[in-house]
Image: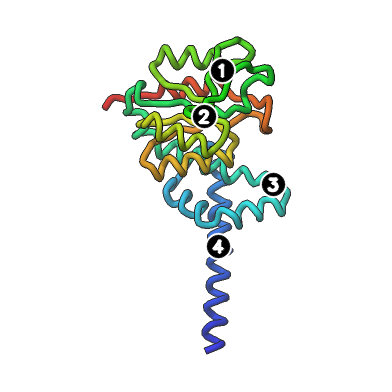
Amino acid sequence: MLEAIGRLVVIFAIAFVALIAVALLFCAYTVHTKKIIFPNFVLFIISLLYEPLRRLLSFFHVDPALIDGVSVEIRNALNYPDFACTNMEERVLILPQCIRSTECPAKLSSLDGIHCMECGKCAIGELSASCKELGIKMYISPGGTFTGRILMLCRAKAVVGIACYPNLNEGMLNTKLIGVPSQGVPLTTQGCVNTTVDYEAIINKCKMQISK
């Protein structure tokens, strides 16, 4: 009996190591080639081994957010068809408060987040104007819990989210669970204040559309 248990443990350990190796190979391939192969399979392995993969990368002094970055790009690709066939007025853009100016005069609403005043102190005002032209609703969320509240309030059929890779990955998973196709745009600098993002990339995501 003990011998059989020992064999099972060895087999499990070998399979575990093999899965981690496969996941890292696929992640490396995606990062270096910008191509995604077997997206559902890769996303499944990454989700299954999320914490071990992040710990392993940290051990070798590699940014563990790499795992989240690959996951986000895969989710973007998988969600594209469902997202792009929605109407503009069915979409929402959710921004994190960290990209607004430290001198931002906007007030926080307990119902739907921070209301941009288009004061010109940061580029959010330009995004707000662009969203109005496109017919897309824009929200500025102070946190993940608030984001969930906003999505329930606006009943969006599709969402574009902006955040750091770990938060973006988690947020896109949450929107998947409630059946809302999403697209994610990562921050270009990290932190809690004065972060930056590619505003052109945001608008391009918001405007994605294909014929139904």
Q: Residue furthest top?
A: 120
Tag 1: amino acid = Ile
**Would residue 42 appear left or right of 142 to someone viewing this image?**
left
Using the image as rendered, state which of residue 21 and residue 130 is in the foreground: 130
Q: Position of residue 1 (x, y in %)?
A: 52, 89
Label 1 SS: helix
Q: Which mark is residue 62?
A: 3
Sequence-wise, which precedes: disc 1 or disc 2?
A: 2
Categorize mark 4 by other alpha carbons within 10 Å: few (<14), some (14-19), many (20+): few
Q: Which residue is mark 2?
A: 110
Label 3 SS: loop
**Would residue 90 appear left or right of 75 to someone viewing this image?**
left
Q: Position of residue 71 (x, y in %)?
A: 51, 43
Categorize mark 2 by other alpha carbons within 10 Å: few (<14), some (14-19), many (20+): few
Sequence-wise, which precedes: disc 1 or disc 4?
A: 4
Which part of the image, by quadrant, shows the C terminus?
top left
Q: Which-is-in-front pick, marks 2 and 4?
A: 2
Q: Which residue is mark 4?
A: 18
Image point (60%, 30%), residue name: 187
Q: Which mark is residue 124?
A: 1
The answer to whether marks 3 and 4 mark residues whose Cβ atoms lie closer than 8 Å is: no
Q: Position of residue 42 (x, y in %)?
A: 48, 50
- Indicate whether 163 appears above or below 63: above
Sequence-wise, which precedes: disc 2 or disc 3?
A: 3
Tag 4: amino acid = Ala
